[in-house]
Image (cartoon, rainbow, N blue to C red):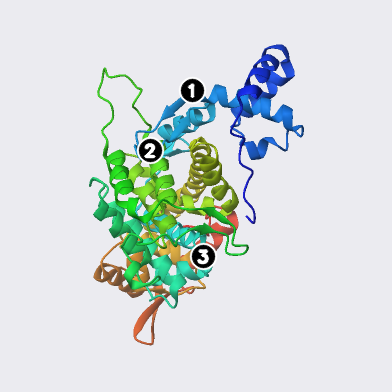
Amino acid sequence: MTKLPEKPPSDLTLDLTDGQTDYFTDDQFKENVTEYNRRYLSWDELKYRIPDPGKRKKAWAVMKLYREMRREQVPYPPLKLVYTIVPEIVKSLHTIDSYLTGHIRIHNKTIRLEQSYIINSFMEEAIASSILEGAATTRRVAKEMLRKGRKPRNSSEQMVLNNYEAMKFILDLKDEPLNTALILEIHRLVTKGTIDTGAIGQFRTNNDTVVASPVTGVVYHTPPDYREIEQYITELCTFANRAEPEAGRGTEEYIHPVIAGIILHFLIGYIHPFEDGNGRTARSLFYWYVISRGYWLFEYMPISRIILRSKKKYSLAYLHTEFDEMDLTYFILYNLSCIDEARKDLLRYLEEKQTEQNATKAIIKKIKDINPREGDILRSMMEHSDEYFTIREIMQKYNTVYETARTDLLHLADLGYLIKEKRGREFIFIFNEDSGLWKQHAKKNTAGNLHSSTEGS
């Protein structure tokens, strides 16, 4: 994005009077205003739909009036933050509540969610979040580094590893209340070895930090004064730790947990409390919050991968919010759309995993002397027979200790299904294509019964 969106007009008093007259006398005007509000268009988007400046201001004035009538205030004293519950938000939250707090069913069966799925999703999230912040790496190279457990070769790979470790860290602390120390620790994890040592895990100590285009130098956002950061963060923690309203107290203070998580994401981006690493910290904090509130299936959804596909919209969601009187609806709608795309990706991914599970069961049925994990290792290596695997890679993928991964691989090698070779200082394992299992695999693959996954193995 090379230039800023146009800011909305501030004085709409006369336009509102004329706009209300048109709203009740002109059916087309009323229909347009209703549709634009349903889609929650920004002023910047509206100017392309209503070329006439006078008519555009009248429409905007009426749109703003009806938005304000349905507004909710966010209990965050340092800023006047608001949002409007529109039908699209209600629909999205219903979908999230239906899918992401319980069991996912595919083809009328509840699929078993393995630990390896979490590992894979955390890898995808770590990679996408890093690339969003400028890491110069490819998904394939970064994922190979994480899978094989090799040390990062440059700062971009270090950034990916940091994000991966941060994702595992927040999962371990999902039951802890949020405090300043936890936020600083998340920042330390995502930035270690990638920025100046003095800035790691520390709030900025000056006002030199701005959000700007690296190409044109256009400033998108100037954060609050650094001397106000501690107050902003303290209030952010208070907001995150607030209890839901008790029964009988009404719903005026209730904020849906996913919306609250999105607000936390926005606030870290707005406050920009660090010299660098604000985006990575914000997205990690969002995950921590929604998982801590029972939306455990977010563990399996790399949302940054969706944001990476729409970086301009991500930036505009921030800007439209800040330019339009801190109306968070734009940012909420954008993030909900990303969550829904990630949910659909998850369903497609799990359909592939369901096929893999069936293939693993077939292998275990044929080979009596292996456990389910060894069956899945064998299936994965068989489907990637042109690759080699290390003990550390299997340990990483299946979240086991080194000795367990070693035992599994050696057992499969002893049975003749894997070939063990020495490469440098470590052993590598390759699927033995001369084993009888390969012939059966090839036969089933020809029949279309075995599906090779490219994403999750």
Instruction: State the image coordinates of residue 343 (x, y, percent, origin top left).
Output: 48, 43
Q: Quadrant of the N terminus?
A: bottom right
Tell me the CA gap for discs 2 and 3. 27 Å
Disc ID at residue 134:
3
Mark 3 lies on a secondary structure that is loop
Q: Mark 3: give few (<14), some (14-19) or many (20+) Cα within 10 Å.
A: few
Residue at the image point whose x is 38% and y is 38% from the top: 260
Between 425 and 324, the one nearer to me in the picture: 324
Residue beneath disc 2? 260
Is residue 213 depicted above or below 435 in this figure? above
Q: Position of residue 24 (x, y in %)?
A: 67, 12
Q: Amino acid at mark 1?
A: Arg
Q: Is residue 415 above or below residue 448?
A: below
Q: Kindly state the secondary structure of the residue where label 1 is placed.
A: loop
Q: Nearer the viewer, residue 101 or 262?
A: 262
Which residue lies at the image location 44% right of the left edge and 51% below the top edge?
269
Real-space Cα separation, disc 2 to disc 1, in angstroms: 18 Å
Q: Earlier in the sequence, mark 2 or mark 3?
A: 3
Count of numbered marks: 3
